[in-house]
Amino acid sequence: MDNELHNLITELTGGDDQTAESAVGAIAKMGQNKPDEVLRTIRVLLDSEDADERWWGVRLLADISDRTALPLLRLALRDEDKYVRQCAALGLRKKPHTAAAVDLIDALNDDNHLVVELAADALTEIGEGAVPALLEVLEVGNPKARLEAVRALAEIGDHRSIPELFSLLDDDSQLIAYWANEGLERMGVGMVYYLP
């Protein structure tokens, strides 16, 4: 590791969030010229026993443009630390890709509510590519996952979800019914849609 990168990593993990955020930008920029060295350094952070170091490693992944960032972010969604998982979901929101949909769907079952919400936000950013998996969650998911799935579908606005959203208007959960109605309204369907 060269001296500049070493110094930036020291700033990143030094405990001062403002200094660390500045280091993130500098390391991400460095990654454009020295991608292999920066990725090796990030992998060291991701393998750390210190959850804070893993968090900053994931935070870096969200800002680098290397193609290997996506699989590493997907893996971080399974970290034992909820804050690392939250950061991974945020990172995947910034890097929407259909390949991450399966991991984000799994994250809808996380025991941390914020991870679940952020995973749904990331699925929303994926858009149409996430719709089939989200529709399946409505059928088999737990209540928390179903709520976030219907919210994501409402925000995506894909017409394939219309029949399912319509069927949820009478759901026992008022929040699910609300998001189903919201999705239909956003698509301009509302109560003018009738099932055959």
Image (tube, rainbow, N blue to C red):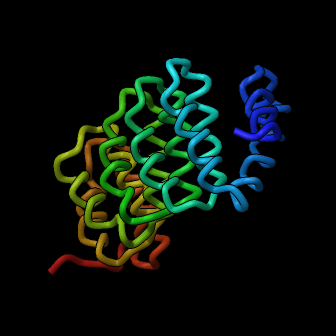
**Residue 23 sits in which quadrant?**
top right
Counting labels gives 0
Q: Residue furthest front?
A: 2
Q: Residue 176: give x, y in percent of width and height.
A: 36, 49
- Residue at image position (57%, 60%) is 66
Q: Nearer the viewer, residue 82 or 135?
A: 82
In the rendered view, tell whether residue 160 sits above or below residue 10: below
Q: Is residue 186 left or right of residue 65?
A: left
Q: Residue 112: give x, y in percent of width and height.
A: 43, 28
- In which quadrant will I find the C terminus? bottom left
**Residue 59 sits in which quadrant?**
top right
- Residue at image position (17%, 47%) is 140
Q: Nearer the viewer, residue 69 or 80?
A: 69
In the rendered view, tell whether residue 102 sits above or below residue 1: below
- In which quadrant will I find the N terminus? top right
In the rendered view, tell whether residue 66 sits above or below residue 60: below
Q: Nearer the viewer, residue 151 or 70?
A: 70
- Residue at image position (39%, 62%) is 153
Q: Nearer the viewer, residue 145 or 102?
A: 102
Q: Is residue 12 left or right of residue 156?
A: right
- Residue at image position (38%, 49%) is 104
Q: Residue 70: give x, y in percent of width and height.
A: 47, 55
Q: Residue 21: give x, y in percent of width and height.
A: 78, 38
